[in-house]
Image (cartoon, rainbow, N blue to C red):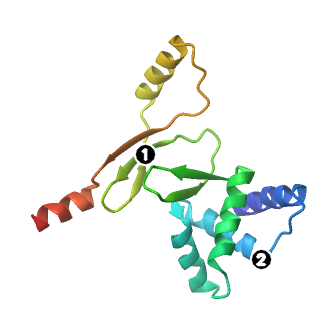
Amino acid sequence: MQMKQQVKEQFNHFLSRKNLKTTLQRNLVVDAMVELDRHTHVDELYLLLRAKHPYIGHATVYRALRLLAESGLVREINLGDGITRYRLARQGERRDYLVCSDCGGVTEFENGLVEKEQLKRAHSLGFMVESFKIELKGLCRHCQGRNSRTH
């Protein structure tokens, strides 16, 4: 509950700096992102919110997510499949992903050894890294099982 309030306060501060209003719909999107606490995309979030709040519009959810991303409270994740995913930002967050090319599922993972070697190599080449993301595409366990049953 404390995290939700903290995120709302930070978002409302961001909105006021941009001379934008705090609205019920924007607060509903913030609440949903905090409660969901995983990757989501605008269509999924819209359907989840619409189930409880039938008056909320798709464009409203999209615009609220874009504002949350602009504020830095939510991260936009583009994995090259045409779907922009969103997730609540965390300090020191890792950006390593397993992406299922069949169902589109995303699983985060961490491998500090790989990161350390990549950063060391970048530094030796005179490159200053600002962000770091590893993305592996393939089939998740569920889709592997489903695909083996169809062949």
**Amino acid carrying mark 2 in the image:** Leu
Among numbered discs 2 and 1, the one appearing first in the sequence: 2
Residue closer to the observer: 137 or 1:
137
Q: x and y percent of residue 125 in the render?
A: 51, 13
Q: Is residue 53 left or right of residue 149?
A: right
Is 59 in front, or is 86?
Answer: 59
As helix, strand or loop, the secondary structure at mark 2 comes to helix
Residue at horizontal 73%, vertical 76%? 25
Q: Report the quarter where the C terminus lies.
A: bottom left
Q: Residue at x 51, y 22 (%)?
A: 119
Q: Which quarter of the picture shows residue 63? A: bottom right
The residue identified by callout 2 is 24
Residue at 41%, 42% (x, y): give it: 135
Q: x, y (%) of residue 57?
A: 65, 80
Q: Is residue 145 left or right of residue 57?
A: left
- Classify residue 61 by image quadrant: bottom right
Q: In the image, what residue type sits under mark 1?
A: Tyr
75 left or right, relative to 104: right
In the visual, does 101 lie left or right of 123?
left
Q: Quadrant of residue 109?
A: top left
Quarter of the image that includes the N terminus: bottom right
